[in-house]
Amino acid sequence: MQRVCFQLQVKPERLAEYRERHAAVWPDMLRALKDTGWNNYSLFVRDDGLLIGYFETPSLEAAQAGMAATEVNARWQAEMGDFFEDLDVAPDEGFLRLTEIFNLDTQLSAASDADSSLERNHS
């Protein structure tokens, strides 16, 4: 499962409306996201409009392609595009993907595997 984190910049003067729109996302948009592999999807925003998104998916490319094939996504992206600064493509195509540098579960698993290997070697 890929963990995807991304950044966008909401125009500060549009932030209140952006928050309102996301308080009640269209039900068909919610279903489309889930059906196309956008799992555990969250958005976080600072008061200056810095937006951080996170989701988990088997394939980012498949998740984006799946949404691109839906009519509801075309409508949603058309409505959301004007909320963002410095964006000349749809928001779901123009986000800046952040590089994961730490994951607790991954490191705990690796440490556990290393401990198990040491125990086997000393037995």
Image (spheres, grey):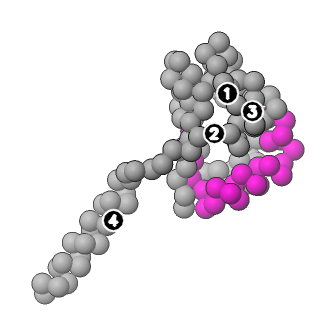
Query: In the rendered structure, are the residues bearing label 2 and label 4 in contact, judged by CB atoms less than 8 Å apart?
Result: no
47 over 73 or under it: above or below: above
Looking at the rendered image, the quarter that the C terminus falls into is bottom left
Query: In the rendered structure, are the residues bearing label 2 and label 3 in contact, judged by CB atoms less than 8 Å apart?
Result: no
Q: Which mark is residue 100?
A: none
Given the image, on which type of amino acid does mark 3 rest? Answer: Asp
Please state if 123 lies on the left or on the right of 14 as rendered.
Answer: left
Q: Position of residue 23 (x, y in %)?
A: 65, 27
* First of labels 4, 3 by sequence position: 3
Instruction: Count residues near mark 2 (Cα–Cα under 10 Å), then give few for <14, some for 14-19, many for 20+.
Output: some
Disc 1 designates what residue? 86
Query: In the rendered structure, are the residues bearing label 1 and label 3 in contact, judged by CB atoms less than 8 Å apart?
Result: yes
* First of labels 1, 4 by sequence position: 1
The region drawn magenta spans 53-76
Q: What element carries label 2?
A: loop
Looking at the rendered image, the quarter that the N terminus falls into is bottom right
Disc 4 designates what residue? 109
Distance (Cα) linking label 2 and label 3: 11 Å
Instruction: Count residues near mark 1 (Cα–Cα under 10 Å), then give few for <14, some for 14-19, many for 20+.
Output: few
106 over 14 or under it: above or below: below
Q: What element carries label 4?
A: helix
Residue at left offset 65%, top offset 12% = 13
Q: Nearer the viewer, mark 2 or mark 1?
A: 1
Q: What element carries label 1?
A: loop
Disc 2 designates what residue? 95
Residue at left offset 76%, top offset 55% = 65
Query: In the rendered structure, are the residues bearing label 1 and label 4 in contact, judged by CB atoms less than 8 Å apart?
Result: no
Given the image, on which type of amino acid does mark 1 rest? Answer: Asp
